Image (cartoon, rainbow, N blue to C red):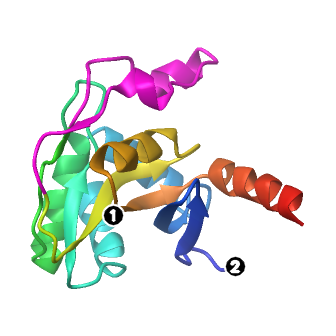
């Protein structure tokens, strides 16, 4: 695999698509800047993600730990500026600890901890692409996809964690 080669994997029936691996090149640095709301990082990530989206997509940002989409909404708006794709702020969640902070304490939040729910309907003639900055275990994105009822998760970067989980599950299938 070359640096920043797009990644596509399926976990628990949900498709994940990413522009590249978290630890490749500048991706880790960009990912941290995305969480800080850095405009240059948002623009860079949006240009990379825009290359992967079909014309019939609709962007659905994932809610953050405050219950609504903030950083992912900024990213979705930047992606839309390049693709002209519509954005539907269809998901909400409960206010909670961030997944990042929970991991620093050695915990992982479950989908139930996030309390995601659909607050708006989606057009039936478009494919929902659930926008996330970075996918690690995939728990947040899976919870969002389940709450939405459909969709493909698209992120700037993907850590090896989800890919390793998939490799382990594939090894049991053989």
Farthest-out residue, bottom: 55
Image coordinates for residue 14, horizontal then vertical, percent: 49, 59
Image coordinates for residue 52, horizontal then vertical, percent: 37, 79
Q: Is residue 51 above or below residue 80?
A: below
Does residue 38 appear in the picture of this structure?
no
Depth order, front residue of 147/158: 147
Give whichever of discs 1 and 2 has the lower sequence position. Answer: 2
Say which element carries label 1.
helix
Residue placed at 60% from the left, 19% from the top? 107
**Split into 4 quadrants, where in the image is the C terminus?**
bottom right
CB under 8 Å between callouts 1 and 2?
A: no
Q: Tell me, yes or no, whether the highlighted magenta stretch contains residue 51.
A: no
On screen, residue 25 versus residue 174, left or right, reads: left
Residue corresponding to mark 2: 1
Residue placed at 69% from the left, 79% from the top? 1
On screen, residue 71 versus residue 48, left or right, reads: left
Does residue 16 appear in the picture of this structure?
yes
On screen, residue 104 versus residue 96, left or right, reads: right
Residue placed at 63% from the left, 51% from the top? 162
Image coordinates for residue 31, horizontal then vertical, percent: 43, 50
Depth order, front residue of 1/136: 136
On screen, residue 132 versus residue 15, left or right, reads: left
Q: Tell me, yes or no, whether the highlighted magenta stretch contains residue 110.
A: yes
For disc 2, the neighbor class at 10 Å (few under 14, some 14 to 19, many from 20) is: few
Say which element carries label 2.
loop
Image coordinates for residue 127, horizontal then vertical, percent: 26, 72
Query: Marks 1/2: CA distance?
Result: 20 Å
Residue corresponding to mark 1: 45
Task: Write down the region rendered in magenta.
Answer: 92-121
């Amino acid at each position: 695999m070359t640096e920043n080669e797009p990644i596509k994997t399926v976990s628990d029936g949900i498709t994940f698509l990413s522009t590249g691996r978290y630890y490749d090149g500048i991706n880790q640095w960009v990912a941290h800047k995305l969480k800080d709301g850095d405009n240059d990082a948002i623009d860079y990530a949006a240009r990379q993600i825009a290359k992967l989206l079909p014309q019939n997509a609709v962007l659905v940002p994932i809610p953050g730990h405050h219950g609504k989409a903030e950083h992912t909404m900024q990213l979705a708006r930047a992606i839309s500026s390049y693709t002209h794709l519509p954005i539907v702020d269809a998901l909400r969640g409960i206010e909670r600890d961030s997944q990042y902070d929970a991991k620093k304490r050695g915990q992982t939040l479950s989908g139930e901890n996030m309390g995601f729910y659909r607050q708006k309907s989606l057009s039936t003639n478009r494919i929902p692409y659930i926008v996330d900055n970075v996918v690690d275990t995939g728990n947040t994105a899976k919870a969002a996809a389940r709450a939405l009822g459909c969709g493909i998760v698209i992120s700037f970067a993907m850590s090896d964690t989800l890919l390793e989980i998939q490799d382990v599950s594939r090894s049991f299938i053989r």
